[in-house]
Image (cartoon, rainbow, N blue to C red):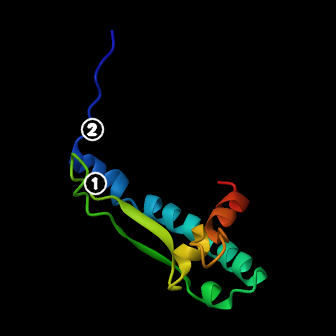
Amino acid sequence: MTSKFTVSEDWMRKNVLANPTVTAALNAKARRLAPIVKRIALKEGDQRYAASVRVIQGQRPGSKSPSHIQRPYARVMIGDENATAKEYGDGKLPKKGFLRRAIAEMGD
C-alpha cells in the first residue's frame, strides 16, 4: 500500500524557500564561482570584465510557476556591456566563455 504525501505551500515557504540554510548555500556557491570568473578574465587580460563581476541575491517572482511560489536565487552577474558577446561571441568579438569555463573548473 502506498500513501500519497502532499506538501502544502505554507510548509514549503517556511521550511525550504525562506530557510536561511538554503539561501546561504545558494549564496555560497555563487561566491565560490565569482573569483574563478574574475581569475579567468584577468588571465585573458580583460580587466574591465573582471572588475564588473558581482554576486546578487533575490527572489524569483514566481509568475511563470503554476503554484506561483517565489524561489530564492543567488547569481553571478557581469556588468561589462559586452559580457554576452564575450561569453558567446558575436562576429566582432571572439567567444571567450569566461562563465562556462569557471563553472566547468568549479565542478559542482
Question: Which of 19 and 89 lies nearest the eye of the viewer?
Answer: 89
Task: Tell me the number on the disc at residue 85.
Answer: none
Contact, CB < 8 Å: mark 1 with mark 2? no
Query: Label 1: which residue?
Result: 13
How many other residues sit within 10 Å of disc 1, few (<14), some (14-19) or many (≥20)? some
Residue at position x 33%, y 9% in the image: 1
Outermost residue on the front side: it is 91
Residue at position x 73%, y 75% in the image: 40
Horizontal side, residue 42 vs residue 24: left or right: right
N-term-proximal mark, 1 vs 2: 2
Callout 1 secondary element:
helix
Task: Tell me the number on the disc at residue 7.
Answer: 2
Question: Which of 6 and 95 lies nearest the eye of the viewer?
Answer: 95
User: Alpha carbon of mark 1 to alpha carbon of mark 2: how far?
Assistant: 10 Å
Residue at position x 46%, y 68% in the image: 74
Residue at position x 27%, y 38% in the image: 7
In this view, 69 is above or below 33? above
Question: Hey, what amino acid is under mark 1?
Answer: Arg
For the C terminus, the image quarter is bottom right
Question: Where in the figure is residue 36, as x and y percent of width and height?
Answer: 69, 73
Question: Where in the figure is residue 3, as x and y percent of width and height?
Answer: 30, 18
> On the image, which quarter does residue 93 sit in?
bottom right
How many other residues sit within 10 Å of disc 2, few (<14), some (14-19) or many (≥20)? few
Question: Where in the figure is residue 102, as x and y percent of width and height?
Answer: 68, 66
Question: Hey, what amino acid is under mark 2?
Answer: Val
Outermost residue on the right side: it is 43
Question: Where in the figure is residue 88, as x and y percent of width and height?
Answer: 58, 67
In this view, 32 is above or below 45? above
| Number of dots carrying numbers | 2
Horizontal side, residue 40 vs residue 93: left or right: right
